[in-house]
Image (cartoon, rainbow, N blue to C red):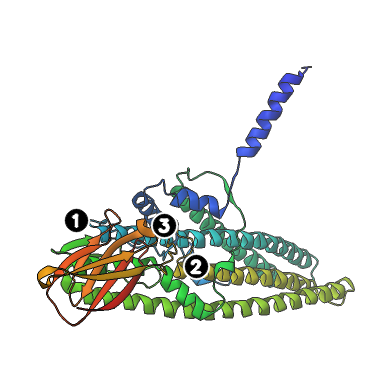
Amino acid sequence: MYIITSKLLTILLLLTFSFGTYASEVLSLGDLREKVLSNNNDIKIQYEKFNQAKQNVKSKFGEFLPNLDFQLLYLNSTYSLIYSVVPTPSNWFEYKASHELKYAEEFATDSLRLNILKDLTQTYININSQSKILNLLYDEETLLVEAHEYAERMETLGLGSVDETFNSLRSLLKHRQQLFALESIINIQKEALLYVIDKAPNSDIELQDHFHNIDLIPSTVKEAISFGINNSSELIANTFLIEEARYMNTSSRWSFVSFSGIGLGYAADVKISRSRVNELVLKGKKISNEIRNQISHSFIKLDNISRRINIQKDILTASRENLVRVTDLYQGDKAEYKDYIKAQRSVISGKRSLINIKMDYEIQITQMKRLLGLDASAAKVENIDISEVVLDISVNQRRFGKKYISADVIINPGIKDQVLSVVYSGDVINTRLINHNKDFSIYKKIKAYGDKTIKVKVLFTNGKSIELEKTIKL
């Protein structure tokens, strides 16, 4: 007989604890977001990996989805990773050095991050919801096994029939086919997530429950549209492209990923030149209209889904009440066994439907957040107080009738670093200043007479701008 010393026992306990701790890694949605979209990661590499994972899922799903009972899963939820918002790879930001294009790239890259984040979140929600459905299917399998065994006993006793036994077996086997298909679909999606976060395909992970915080979503359509347009990475990138096109001396070509995840069409190859200003302006208006329409539609869908959830809860309550009634009748020999099984399956079916509708709700919230530009991890659309920006103009008249205009844009020192450019225009000045030294003043000799207008446009690094105007007498 071996004697285990206290030291050896301690080591064994530590090893046991360690194996138990690392057998299954628990990940939250926040963990996955950090692993995939960390600013320390090269977004190009992460995009390519995510796109490859999407293609692998699409290929593997084909074997199971045609045979999957769509009573188990809603079509739009099931296919979320197949029809990912992440587009097909293109060239990456090839252009001549430029201040505007630098910021256009930053916000365009942020759109790509948001696209990946949206699809990653949908996949996470799918796996969690489908896992809950899978557990309910296992519960239902137990009932079907009992029903088949009961049919066999009844047939043996001469109280049943061959057809009833066969039908119970067929129902059981068909149900197990659904179980196998759903297990496979969950594993395929988990494998895709593991690939994206650089883990082995056979790694054991467990996903925590996730519920969206809807406090950040505006309460009205009008507020949401205003927020979405103000926060749109696509619109801000488009703004910088317009500014570049207006003031560049030679045309250049700018290639980038084609964003189409939420209907915001974007050219994959833009030839930037002065002649394309109007085209880019129209593109910006198109994007704005897309955002308005889709946000309005999302509010309608969220309201409809909320009503469906309430109705399904009522249905589930009725199914549970029916189960209590049928159970009492069955125990009193006033209802058949098959009615008792049917009532139990009805409750399970009601739970399954409720999970599906709640999954649709969570996915719709994810889409709404994408439309609003929330959860961005790279280029933040910071609010800049531009109320203190002042245009200061003075006219100096020297000997021999010479006149000089002194113009300056007075800006709060706290936001001077966030100024990209200052453009003077109007009747007597046409000058563009890039913010190299935080000096936005100009001094110019003029020969004009009468009332003249001077305009200035200040463009900030968050894509916002302010335009001021003054009339002077010469």
Q: What residue type is labelled 2?
A: Lys
Q: What residue type is labelled 1?
A: Lys
Asked which quadrant contains residue 439, the reply is bottom left
Q: Name the residue under label 3.
A: 414
Q: Give the Cα separation between the discs numbered 3 and 1.
A: 30 Å
Please rate how many residues cluster around mark 3, counting C-alpha atoms within 10 Å: few if below 14, some from 14 to 19, many from 20: few
Visible in this render: residue 161? no
* Relative horizontal placement of residue 94, taking residue 315 as reference (left or right): left
Q: Which of marks 2 and 1 is nearer the N terminus?
A: 1
Of 186 and 446, which appears nearest the observer? 446
Q: Nearer the viewer, mark 3 or mark 1?
A: 3
Q: What residue type is labelled 3?
A: Gly
Q: Mark 1 points at which residue?
A: 96
Asked which quadrant contains residue 324, the reply is bottom right
Of 22 and 447, which appears nearest the observer? 447
Q: What element carries label 3?
A: helix
Q: Give the Cα separation between the discs numbered 2 and 3.
A: 30 Å
Visible in this render: residue 269? yes
Q: Residue reaching furthest right?
A: 332
**Residue 369, label in figure:** 2
Of 329 and 364, which appears nearest the observer? 364
